[in-house]
Amino acid sequence: MKKKVVALLAGAMLTFATSAMAVQPLQSADLYIGGTYSTINMLQGTTDHGKVSWVQVAENGGSIETSTLNGQQLNYLYCVDISTTVGVPNDYNNTFVSNSGQIHLNGTPLTVNNAGSVAYLLQTYGINGQGDQAKALQAAIWTEIYGTNSANQYILDTTYYNANGGSKIVNLYNTYVAEANTHSGAVDQLRWLSPGLSGDPSVYQGLVTSGPVPEPSTIVLLCAGIIGLAVFGKYRTVKTA
């Protein structure tokens, strides 16, 4: 009986620790966005009578360095929304944070298209900075979100990059898009951000970042739960033998 109680306690601790590590939704968080954007050359496609017309557009994106959420340094910070902008550097003290793949645009909640694919890309390739990998990843994120929207599509301008020494960006982008089309990540393990300011009804460009790093106390609880289960498993093995 005593051993069953130990096992139950260990399992409860493990469950508690695991749940504590999950990303929790926040309201009115303080998002500081530092650093700068990169200019990423995209093609915007509009459909008229079944025919897609493409125009070159320059969009600002990449992972914005030196950014924090409630004082916590962010591993990366990528753009989700492409139709609005957010000024940098700036402190957005009324930022809505979601773990359900939603952003807000002027008070209207919007579910990010293909959020699972975006989550996979970030959880697999997410990196801070403005290098080739970050640029290719940002372009792939936009393609996943807008690529299936017949009214407004965005793809990387591969012709421009191949002609201007950016073949690495093109190759990375093609890899990311191909993998995203067949994989899905954990949407609730990311933070989907809608930057805002107190007293300002506007919601700025939707952003996405990684989930929080587990606090030391959470790690201790998780380890204690695992050790408890391991000890009980060893006891069961010895008793059986």
Image (cartoon, helix red, strand yellow):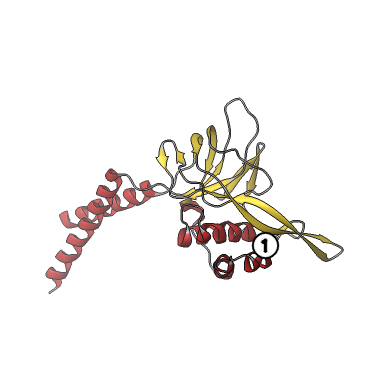
Residue 174 at least partly seen: yes
Residue 212 at x, y = what percent? 40, 46
Residue 56 at x, y = what percent? 73, 58
Say how many tags the image has: 1
Residue 128 at x, y = what percent? 46, 52
Residue 175 at x, y = what percent? 55, 70
User: Which one is in front, 41 or 142?
Assistant: 41
The residue identified by callout 1 is 155
Quarter of the image for residue 73 reads top left
Residue 182 at least partly seen: no
Q: Quadrant of the C terminus?
A: bottom left
Tell me the SS state at disc 1: strand
When the figure is inspected, residue 168 is found, relative to residue 222, above or below; the finding is below
Q: Residue at x 58, y 30 (%)?
A: 197
Q: Residue at x 61, y 40 (%)?
A: 86
* Residue at the farthest top position: 199
Left/right placement of residue 231 relative to residue 208 reads: left
Left/right placement of residue 68 relative to residue 49 reads: left
When the figure is inspected, residue 99 is found, relative to residue 174, above or below; the finding is above
Q: Assess disc 1: are there few (<14), some (14-19) or many (≥20) residues with their C-alpha within 10 Å of its C-alpha.
A: many
When the figure is inspected, residue 142 is found, relative to residue 179, above or below; the finding is above
Q: Quadrant of the N terminus?
A: bottom left
Quarter of the image for residue 51 reads bottom right
Left/right placement of residue 8 relative to residue 181 reads: left
User: Which one is in front, 72 or 97?
Assistant: 72
Q: Amino acid at mark 1?
A: Ile
Q: Residue at x 46, y 59 (%)?
A: 123
* Residue at the farthest bottom position: 241
User: Which one is in front, 137 or 106?
Assistant: 137
* Residue at the farthest right position: 49
